[in-house]
């Protein structure tokens, strides 16, 4: 199953390689990894999406907690949380198809950030499923390039279940 | 008065209780060496940095203190890596100090520069690059704190040369400053879990204790013995756990796992409740996981939460210091002792265990030559079980585990996790530094001893009466055994027909060299070695193709034992 982990770390040199080395060295899978500052100086948050059965996820979380630079690990999958990822797509778009593509992008509330001769660059933000759906739909026109940030996520204050 | 980084570092070491440093100098650490004579630190000059780390490791295993090694940058640091990885896999507390090129040169492929912090990230508990002098004292304190608390392990501190030279006013950081919000090992057991564990143990018909190295590192042998004896539970130990329960106690079944005893492996397989303490269900112990302890409810006590449920299902997990957990169990059991004769309840089970032990005891077949098992048994008898035994790796190690009875903790020093050939001699030297008056014996193979034989001179010039007993079979015996059993006797790369003359070699180093070629010579030669106040090598020409039994083929079930 896919899990979203929010990992609070001391922002010191090498911390990223400690985390990524833990995953590679133990054969765990990283799907996406995003790092950025938090409100607190010297502390960063990493959002890691990964897949594995319960036992593997339990090991990943415990192993992360064991690292001396890791302050806190939360498995957001267990909680109600907001998860978003930003994606840029360069989509093949001949003039004859542009109107059709624009309509589709509208439905997905995407932004067109660049228009070229026969392609456009689309910016979109959304959860895992929305991005996957969009990629699938745009594939029929041809996606030339893709860049993604990896998910960022926050636990909701109200935990409804 | 301002002090240099080198002075500050050494003063911190002294304040952390370090009394011996194992090291080797070089340009990037020379400033610390320059100051070393001014501090009450015994420096043991090794001949290879791997030796320095293994010595610090042997010192730590034997004494229970943090071992400390000091090496230069680049090749000095990379030579230390095997020693560090070895300590990491066995959870041995070490602080390894490496010199580094001056900060302005870092990252420039400077002379003797390597990214040792990067290289050792996966094999240290934690590591530090000191970037400014102000942070040095706190880093050293944290390094010791990390090494010795929680699940112990090696910590590396990389100190650039310019930081060793810079000066500042020094103040030793307070205990409060040492605390890290991201490091809070759980040491106190959860009471509820302990109660559940006691329920299981008291309800068990066929209980067993599976004891590991965690009992030794947390000094938990006493509450373990109390629990086992009060409830009459048989005990089996891992290689790392040997000595945590008296080897001569009737409740002790011997080691379990690949080369464990028939009784221990059968008892594990038939047990209904298992108390696993300070052990990690290593693959050399469990064999095929699907058939490991198939009927047992498992209570697992370990300080490291990652050890729990890593390999096996666990019914009662207890994350805690092993000693505190066992003392907690003792308290609960004590309060309930009057209820029933718990001990008596287990007599059929103990009878069964005894039957297994008599059916297939650890033994060997005598024939013309010298049997290596006989040699280990002779070391045991002649030392009256009072020696500290270090081992190399291979058959020698397994025989040392099987045929010497370890009655107290910290008397077997062996590379359990990494299986590092060349560990034994330097580890024995480290132990002898910690205990100058005890008999320290390295049980060696002719292959392994050659991996760090250069440390013989370290023993000789420090007047350390370490005894090396080589079970010389002219083979890389353990690998040859696998080739014999599982690779159609294709003895490729395992025959060591070109051998040094170990007796002459001992003499060349200024040690005493002795040899035994017939069984009659073994005891007199060992007696002489133990009597001699010098470093001694005993070259024992053992039966060449003797195998270690019992043996469970890798990946097979504990019941699929090949017996003698
Ligand atoms: C550094 C290292 N290299 C290789 C091995 C693989 N290995 C394990 S046991 C063994 C044979 C050891 O031979 P020897 O020291 O002569 O001991 P014996 O098994 O004959 O007692 C080898 C090569 C190892 N454990 N460590």
Image (cartoon, rainbow, N blue to C red):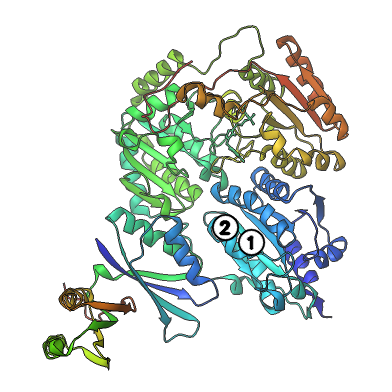
- Sequence-wise, the earlier of marks 2 and 1 is 2
Give the chain of mark 1. B
Question: Viewer-proximal residue, B505 or B327?
Answer: B505
Question: Viewer-proximal residue, A104 or A18?
Answer: A104
Residue B167 in the image, given as x and y percentages of width and height: 79, 79
Residue identifier under label 2: B124
Residue A152 in the image, given as x and y percentages of width and height: 32, 78
Instruction: Locate residue B181 relative to residue B16 in the image: left or right.
Output: left
Give the chain of mark 2. B
- Establish if B248 lies above or below B105: above
Residue identifier under label 1: B156
- Mark identifier at residue B405: none
Question: Viewer-proximal residue, A156 or B83?
Answer: B83
Q: Are the two marked residues, 2 and 1, in contact with CB atoms closer than 8 angstroms?
A: yes
- Establish if A35 lies above or below B341: below
- Establish if A56 lies above or below B342: below
Local crowd size for mark 1, using a 10 Å CA cut-off: few (<14), some (14–19), many (≥20): many
Mark 1 beta carbon near ligand 1 (under 8 Å):
no
At x 76% / y 77%, what residue is drawn? Answer: B170
Ligand 1 quarter of the rendering: top right
Distance, label 2 to label 1, CA atoms, is: 7 Å
Question: Viewer-proximal residue, B349 or B122?
Answer: B122
Residue B323 in the image, given as x and y percentages of width and height: 50, 47
Examine the rendering and report whether any part of residue B510 can be seen. yes
Residue B45 in the image, given as x and y percentages of width and height: 81, 50
**Location of residue B496 by image quarter:** top right
């Amino acid at each position: 199953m896919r899990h979203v982990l929010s990992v609070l770390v001391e922002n010191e040199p090498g911390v990223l390689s400690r985390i990524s080395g833990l995953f590679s060295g133990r054969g765990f899978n990283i799907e996406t990894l995003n790092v950025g500052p938090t409100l607190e100086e010297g502390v960063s948050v990493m959002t890691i999406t990964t897949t594995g059965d319960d036992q593997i996820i339990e090991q990943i979380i415990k192993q992360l907690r064991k690292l001396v630079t890791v302050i806190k690990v939360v498995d957001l999958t267990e909680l109600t949380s907001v998860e978003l990822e930003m994606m840029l797509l360069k989509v093949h778009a001949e003039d004859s198809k542009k109107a059709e593509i624009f309509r589709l992008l509208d439905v997905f509330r995407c932004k067109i950030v660049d228009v070229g001769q026969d392609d456009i660059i689309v910016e979109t933000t959304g959860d895992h499923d929305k991005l996957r759906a969009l990629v699938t739909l745009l594939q029929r026109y041809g996606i030339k390039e893709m860049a993604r940030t990896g998910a960022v996520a926050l636990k909701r204050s109200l935990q409804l279940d | 008065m301002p002090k240099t980084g080198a002075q500050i570092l050494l003063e911190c070491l002294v304040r952390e209780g370090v009394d011996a440093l194992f090291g080797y100098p070089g340009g990037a650490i020379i400033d610390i060496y320059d100051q070393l004579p001014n501090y009450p630190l015994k420096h043991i000059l090794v001949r290879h940095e791997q030796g320095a780390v293994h010595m610090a490791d042997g010192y730590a295993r034997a004494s229970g203190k943090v071992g400390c090694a000091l090496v230069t940058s680049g090749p000095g640091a990379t030579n230390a890596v095997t020693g560090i990885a070895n300590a990491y896999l066995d959870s041995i507390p070490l602080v390894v100090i490496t010199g580094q090129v001056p900060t302005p040169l870092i990252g420039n492929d400077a002379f003797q520069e390597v990214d040792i912090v990067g290289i050792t990230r996966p094999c240290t508990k934690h590591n530090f690059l000191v970037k400014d002098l102000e942070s040095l004292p706190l880093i050293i304190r944290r390094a010791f704190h990390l090494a010795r608390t929680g699940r112990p392990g090696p910590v590396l501190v990389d100190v650039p040369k310019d930081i060793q030279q810079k000066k500042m006013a020094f103040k030793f950081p307070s205990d409060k400053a040492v605390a890290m919000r991201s490091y809070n090992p759980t040491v106190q057991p959860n009471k509820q879990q302990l109660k559940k564990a006691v329920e299981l143990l008291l309800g068990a018909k066929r209980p067993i204790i599976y004891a590991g190295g965690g009992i030794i590192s947390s000094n938990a042998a006493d509450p373990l013995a109390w629990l086992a004896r009060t409830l009459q539970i048989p005990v089996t130990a891992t290689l790392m756990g040997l000595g945590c329960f008296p080897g001569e106690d009737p409740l002790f079944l011997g080691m379990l796992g690949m080369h464990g005893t028939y009784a221990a492996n059968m008892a594990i397989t038939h047990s209904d409740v298992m108390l696993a303490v300070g052990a990690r269900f290593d693959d050399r112990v469990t064999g095929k996981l699907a058939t490991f302890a198939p009927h047992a409810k498992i209570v697992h006590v370990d300080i490291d939460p990652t050890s729990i449920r890593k390999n096996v299902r666990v019914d009662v997990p207890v994350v805690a210091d092993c000693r505190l957990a066992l003392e907690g169990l003792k308290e609960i059991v004590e309060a309930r002792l009057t209820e029933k004769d718990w001990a008596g309840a287990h007599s059929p089970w103990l009878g069964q265990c005894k039957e297994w032990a008599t059916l297939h005891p650890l033994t060997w077949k005598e024939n013309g030559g010298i049997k290596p098992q006989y040699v280990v048994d002779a070391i045991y008898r002649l030392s009256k079980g009072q020696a500290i035994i270090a081992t190399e790796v291979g058959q020698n190690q397994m025989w040392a585990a099987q045929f010497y009875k370890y009655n107290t903790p910290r008397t077997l020093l062996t590379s359990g996790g990494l299986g590092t050939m060349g560990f034994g001699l330097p580890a024995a030297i480290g132990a002898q530094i910690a205990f100058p008056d005890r008999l320290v014996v390295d049980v060696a193979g002719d292959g392994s001893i050659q991996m760090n034989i250069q440390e013989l001179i370290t023993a000789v010039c420090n007047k350390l009466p370490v005894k090396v007993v080589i079970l010389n079979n002219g083979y890389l015996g353990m690998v040859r055994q696998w080739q014999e059993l599982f690779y159609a006797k294709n003895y490729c790369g395992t025959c060591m027909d070109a051998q040094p003359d170990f007796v002459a070699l001992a003499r060349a180093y200024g040690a005493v060299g002795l040899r035994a070629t017939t069984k009659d010579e073994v005891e007199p030669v060992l007696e002489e070695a133990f009597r001699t106040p010098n470093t001694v090598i005993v070259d024992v020409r053992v039966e060449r193709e003797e195998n270690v039994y019992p043996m469970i083929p890798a990946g097979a079930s504990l019941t699929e034992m090949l017996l003698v």
